[in-house]
Image (tube, grey):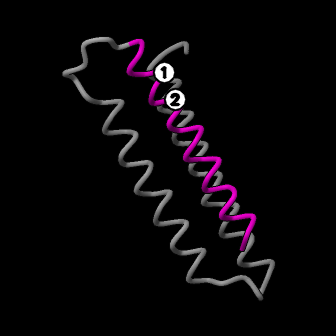
Amino acid sequence: MASIKNLKKDIKYTLGDIISICQITTELNPEADKAKAAAIIDEASVTFDELMAKVNAKDVEDKKAHFKAINAELETKANALIEKVNNL
């Protein structure tokens, strides 16, 4: 990982893209469940807030391991959200 700045950008762009995909899916597919789509968007927003709070935490002993864990958590949560969007 290059920097904290890039990690924050990754979080923002990844979860923002998932929200956009979810919105586009509901617009293009009238049979899609809008309540499920709203739940996915809410979950992405909560995930964003949680990950940004972890990135901004100041009382971290091993910063390198901490940021690697955040990056791994972003990947797993993003994959889970994408799977949910695909099932709409």
Question: Closer to the camera, 69 or 9?
Answer: 69
Name the mark on residue 36.
none
Q: Residue furthest right?
A: 28
Mark 1 crowd level (few <14, some 14–19, many ≥20, 10 Å Cα): few
Task: Give the residue type that dot 1 points to.
Answer: Lys
For the N terminus, the quadrant is top right
Residue shown at the point (35%, 14%) measured from the top left: 63
Give above or below for 50 relative to 64.
below
Q: Where is residue 48? Give x, y as percent.
A: 44, 48
66 within the magenta span: yes
Q: Position of residue 8 (x, y in %)?
A: 47, 32
Q: Is 76 on the left or on the right of 45, as rendered? A: right
Q: Residue 68, labelled with which disc?
A: 1
Asked if labels 1 and 2 touch by Cβ distance under 8 angstroms, the answer is yes
10 Å crowding of disc 2: few (<14), some (14-19), many (20+): some
Q: Look at the magenta stretch and give its main secondary structure.
A: helix
Label 1 SS: helix
Residue for badge 2: 71
Lateral position of residue 48 relative to residue 81, left or right: left
Where residue 57 appears, x then y in whole percent? 25, 29
Residue at the (50%, 27%) spot, across then down = 7
Q: Distance between the residues labelled 2 and 1?
A: 5 Å
> In terms of depth relative to the viewer, which is nearer, 2 or 33?
33
Is residue 20 shown above or below 8?
A: below
In this view, the residue farthest toward the bottom is 31
Q: In this view, does 87 lie to the left or right of 12?
A: right
Provide residue 28's location: percent of width, then percent of height.
80, 77
Q: Residue, x 80% and y 81% (percent of image)?
A: 29
- Residues in magenta? 64-88
Does residue 49 show up magenta in the picture?
no
